Amino acid sequence: MATTRPIERKSGVAIWRQITDEIRSDIMAGNFQPGARMPAEMELAERFGVNRHTVRSAIAALTQEGVLRAEQGRGTFVANARRLTYKIGRRTRISQGLEKQVNETRGILLASSREMANADIALGLNMPEGAAVIRLETMHSADGRPISIATHWIDAERFPAIAEDYAVSTSMTLAFKAAGLTDYFRKSTTISAHHATPEDLKYLKLSPGAIVLAARAINVDTQGKPVQYSLTRFSADRMELSIENETL
């Protein structure tokens, strides 16, 4: 069993959440393989120096989000669900990237609004601060399981109907085509990891303490002009990101 970091009792993070993170780390590191039976509650309680009720809360959270599965009379096991691999390269399209791994992907528009670009968005889209942008909130699922939520900012002057076009097609590629943009490319992607926000928990159906991978990206047209600035959050337990070594 992996070395356990000491539980910090006055860190402001609930003890059961810290235990959840430790178990997730063990699974991601390969210390517990898919299908493996988890140690008994008493053994885990001794490992972390807590009572069984606290361990039970951590196990319940991981079971709820599909990391573990409970079998009546047999115990708790690491779920067999495999991580999907999302390749990030010159042409990054979520449906194409997952088409050989799942039967169906589906996008949905959660919300849209018109707003002024702050300094960060203006820099990403190479436009003046305060310029009008369309903000889209979207979610994608694979075989009925939520895998990502994203926030996109798009030039409102160039693509004034992007929200309506996306709502109809549920595809960013098709929405851009409806506006006359036939092709676009990934210019840059910056990836980080953090605990899921309340919004992440809600739409990705995660439990508190879950980790998400955040990909901040800029897409450009064939002339190199930015057309989309986005922040996509993926469940780290369900997805892995693979960077393809390509250049524009």
Image (spheres, rainbow, N blue to C red):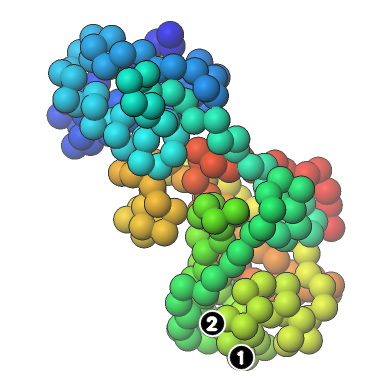
In this picture, is 159 found above or below 69?
below
Quadrant assignment, res 24 = top left
Query: CA–CA distance between discs 2 and 1?
Result: 8 Å
Residue topped by disc 1: 160
Marks 2 and 1: CB-CB under 8 Å? yes
Mark 2 Cα within 10 Å, few/some/many (few <14, many 20+)?
many
Horizontal arrangement in the rendering, residue 224 relative to residue 39 (left or right): right
Instruction: Name the spot of residue 18 as percent of width and height, x first.
Output: 29, 29
Q: Amino acid at mark 2?
A: Ile
Quadrant assignment, res 161 = bottom right
Residue 35 badge: none
The kind of secondary structure element at disc 2 is strand
Q: Amino acid at mark 1?
A: Pro
| Image point (61%, 79%), residue name | 166
| Image point (57%, 81%), residue name | 167
Instruction: Name the spot of residue 56 as percent of width and height, x first.
Output: 24, 27
Can see residue 37?
yes
Question: Which residue is situated farthest in the front direction here?
Answer: 73
Instruction: Name the spot of residue 36 as percent of width and height, x first.
Output: 49, 18
Residue topped by disc 2: 134
